[in-house]
Image (cartoon, grey):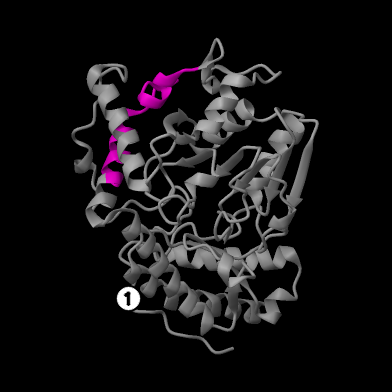
Amino acid sequence: MTMIERPARRPENNLFSSGPCSKHPGWSLENLKEACLGRSHRSKDGKAKLKLAIDKTRALLGVPDGHLIAIVPASDTGAMEMALWSLLGARGVDMLAWESFGKGWVTDAVKQLRLDDVRVIDAPYGQLPDLAQVDCSRDIVFTWNGTTSGVRVTDADWIAATREGLTICDATSAVFAQRLDWRKLDAVTYSWQKVLGGEAAHGMLILSPRAVDRLESYTPPWPMPKIFRMTKDGKLIKAIFEGATINTPSMLCVEDYLDALGWAERIGGLDALIARADANSLIIADWVARTDWIDYLALDPLTRSNTSICLKIIDPDIDSRSLADQTAFAKRLAQLLEAEGVALDIGAHRDAPPGLRIWAGSTIEKQDLIDLTPWLDWAYHTAKGELVQAA
């Protein structure tokens, strides 16, 4: 087999993980020196920081004034659990699943909440479910961008503006990189550590007026953990959406999120963030187009993510082997790249088909992806050569 030389140039930033994701260019611990540390988060200064994070989020994402925004515990998972446990059960629900996180929300509805009327509309990795099957008289739960499959919805046209049910959307690897149609979304969740490269353990929950109406008119039959409770005596606890968090947040993490939001504002806001992710994804697309051993996991080019880019190995010599061998080969590629200090954490998600997953969101510099692609070829040829020698 033909071997290729080790490339001379390495990416300056080798952090291509799909979560937690790379910090933004220019990030430094020095940026966090104004953090409200050693103070109560319920102090005047603490609440002001939390409210500022909410206000900046609204402005940057273009969240309508009628929608409410809360900082909640436990990352995107916590935010989604709050939405599911608080909002579901009033009517039947259509659960869309085409990757591991969507399947996780199905588990919540079926095995934990044990809802009576659940329709699962699913698809294998690499594809979207048939969105025409969705019944908008029912509640809808879906991920906007499948982080572990690299497959996203292209828009919200399939959701009726006159819908009767609520739409609950896990947007954690889409928000700040793809345009969300707020008119069609009633509960949106994400975490700081994804697209803006913030710190983990905090989530965001954005509710439409329709979602608030559900909270105030419907009481789920199951016990509600304290950190999920958004109402008291049948009325919304509005303070939660003004910076009075349910539990104690890390004010250092809050400062880090504010720093990321400030960076996004300085480079041009949402338009600039989307443009950076799109440009980054094109670098990978150009490389895939000229490379015969790799392809996208997403079958339809229109549904390919511009953040969590999931790739599969299509070399017949590898693809014809057992799943265990394919997985071992893909892991070997990631190991070689990590050993060279070129790329960290780019293996496929443990639940996904074997391959690579490269984060291309806005905090990644385009030149680093340009410098990465020759190393991907080097790792492939090196691992393939090891197979030949072992045989």
* Left/right of residue 323 with respect to residue 40 in the rendered view: right
Q: Position of residue 328 (x, y in %)?
A: 65, 64
- Magenta residues span 236-261
Q: Residues within 10 Å of mark 1 (few under 14, many from 20)?
A: few
Kind of residue sitting beneath label 1? Arg
Q: Position of residue 54 (x, y in %)?
A: 34, 34
Q: Residue at x 26, y 16 (%)?
A: 43
Q: Residue at x 30, y 65 (%)?
A: 12
Q: Position of residue 16 (x, y in %)?
A: 43, 59
Q: Is residue 169 depicted above or below 152 in this figure?
A: above
* Left/right of residue 251 with respect to residue 161 in the rendered view: left
Q: Quadrant of the C terminus?
A: bottom right
Q: Is residue 241 magenta?
A: yes
Secondary structure of residue under mark 1: loop
When asked about the image quadrant of residue 347, the answer is bottom right
Q: Is residue 43 magenta?
A: no
Q: Quadrant of the N terminus?
A: bottom right
Q: Is residue 96 visible?
A: yes
Q: Is residue 378 visible?
A: no
Q: Residue at x 62, y 50 (%)?
A: 159
Helix, strand or loop: magenta stretch: helix
Pointer 1: what residue?
9
Closer to us: 221 or 198: 221
Q: Residue furthest bottom?
A: 2
* Left/right of residue 120 with respect to residue 189 in the rendered view: right
Closer to us: 132 or 352: 132
Q: Residue at x 55, y 61 (%)?
A: 154
